[in-house]
Amino acid sequence: MKKQTIIRITDTTLRDAHQSLWATRMRTDDILKIAETIDNAGYYSLECWGGATFDVCMRFLRENPWERLRQIKKVCKKTPLQMLLRGQNILGYKHYPDDVVDRFVALACENGMDIFRVFDALNDPRNLETAIKAVKKYGGHAQGTLCYTTSPVHTVEKYVELAKQQEAMGIDTLAIKDMAGILTPGAARELVTALRKALPDMPIQIHSHMTSGMAAAMYLAAAEAGAGCFDCAISTLSSFSSQPPVESVKVILESEGFQTNLDTAALTKINAYFKDLKAKRQPASTAKVEPVDAGVLVHAIPGGMISNLRSQLAQQDALDRLPEVLEELPKTRADLGYPPLVTPTSQIVGVQSVLNVLSGKRYSMVTDETKRYAAGYYGRTPAPIAPKLRKQLCGTLKPITCRPADLLEPGLAKAASELPPNTIKAEEDILSYALFPEVALGYFKWRKEGGPIPADQEATAGKAESVKVESSGAQATGGQQTAVKGTPVLAPLNGTFYRSDAPGKPQMAADGAAVKSGEAVCVVEAMKLFNPIKAPAAGKITFLVEHGKAVTKGQVLATIE
């Protein structure tokens, strides 16, 4: 095939790169200090928003993600801004009503977003329709996405079929999203060739991670086959579980006759800046990762999930059990119908794998999200889940077969009505709350009252007050023993304690109420997913922890007499 004259490059340094390597801890000020130079480097687009950045801005950095977008747009006037949009999941881990999706896209466009890479973790076209329609409606560039994975049910023919369905929705370009870095040069050549034949006028962009060490070689093969744009990161924030280094990919492509139009001097300046920043922002849990993880070819964990998985296990004081989790994960994925591992399915499968290992018995603890996934509330699974396991996972939740969002009532007015008086400073606050209720409320409280920034305190994380139960029925707090009457309800994981399973919903069990054995009485949010805690006995329940407080594994949450 005749080589294209120009290959375009999207820079992921400001979003996926630091999500993959720095647990998304880059601050807005960090970005603004180098943004003008990045804007002048000659990139096709700058991926700077979406993914985990929105959540982390509020939860850990105490920043307004909307303000981050506005500030970047104010500086970057030459290069289009790009975001990752999880279709009907928007930026969260569940499906949101259509009115929330529509208004989120509208406000993102108003605040400066140009290109929306819209994907669904299950490649279910029904979950892309509303988001793509909204992007086109408000003047954005809609990029469709094929979430790439391998399994008995993922074939080139299937990917081409999915691409045609997205083309019919009106997408402007198509991305192949290789979250885990498992797309080989040969497979990329075959897939891109098939897509170019089936959709000859559709520009194709490829996103990958260097986790397995193959991505740079794969990019060249894909360019030879007709792909015209690739995702890269500046070298200091590249490789490992991030994207290929832009400096190296530039040289590789240009040595083969392609042009990139990237400014080498600007890239050198950008890299020097992030090299200095690295000492401040890279978490200790990701500082010593291996440069290549060939195991990804088995477990297929995407780049962003690798750093989060390490961080989450560290929070549970179980980082040494990472090999067990990596061995368990492909088994859990097969059980759940071979979903591509990308948010939120990577989080669902990953956390369920962690629970399967830490609990000592597979599926003895099942998150609410796993239940809903098995019941169809995230869309169609690529392969069916075995009926017996599906029944076990769903419990009392009734499976569905329709588009999940069809079951949702409009959410904007409800979200606005739930917010405390004098909380809303702008309409964007309503959207922030609609997406991440508890996280947004915590940020709004901090915005009003001030206080420490969680990301600044992470060096001392995990030192929350420890509470354990001894066989004698005593509660140990700070080295002292206090008598505990009745059967204790224990926190199975480090996390945040909640009396209800969603903001605005009634408490799962009232203090002093009679509860049945096996009944869900509270929730511990751990690793961003909700874990229902069941009563170990029947009787009168007394809660010992305040709603919204951090708890540690083994802490007594309540007693039952």
Image: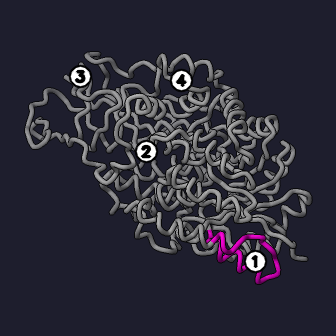
Q: CA distance from mark 4 to mark 1?
A: 49 Å
Q: CA distance from mark 4 to mark 3?
A: 35 Å
Q: CA distance from mark 2 to mark 4?
A: 20 Å
| Residue carrying label 4 | 424
Query: Where on the picture, by quarter, is residue 467?
Result: top left
Residue range in magenta is 244-267
Query: Where on the picture, by quarter, is residue 474?
Result: top left
Q: Looking at the image, is 9 positioned above or below residue 160?
A: below
Q: Is residue 295 magenta?
A: no
| Residue carrying label 3 | 542
Query: Where on the picture, by quarter, is residue 192?
Result: bottom right
Asked whether the beta carbons under mark 4 and mark 1 sit within 8 Å of each other, the answer is no
Query: What residue sits 49% from the left and 28% below the top?
Result: 396
The crowd level at tag 4 (other Cα within 10 Å; few <14, some 14-19, many 20+) is some
| Residue carrying label 2 | 60
Of the residues tagged 2 and 4, which is closer to the observer? 4
| Residue carrying label 1 | 253
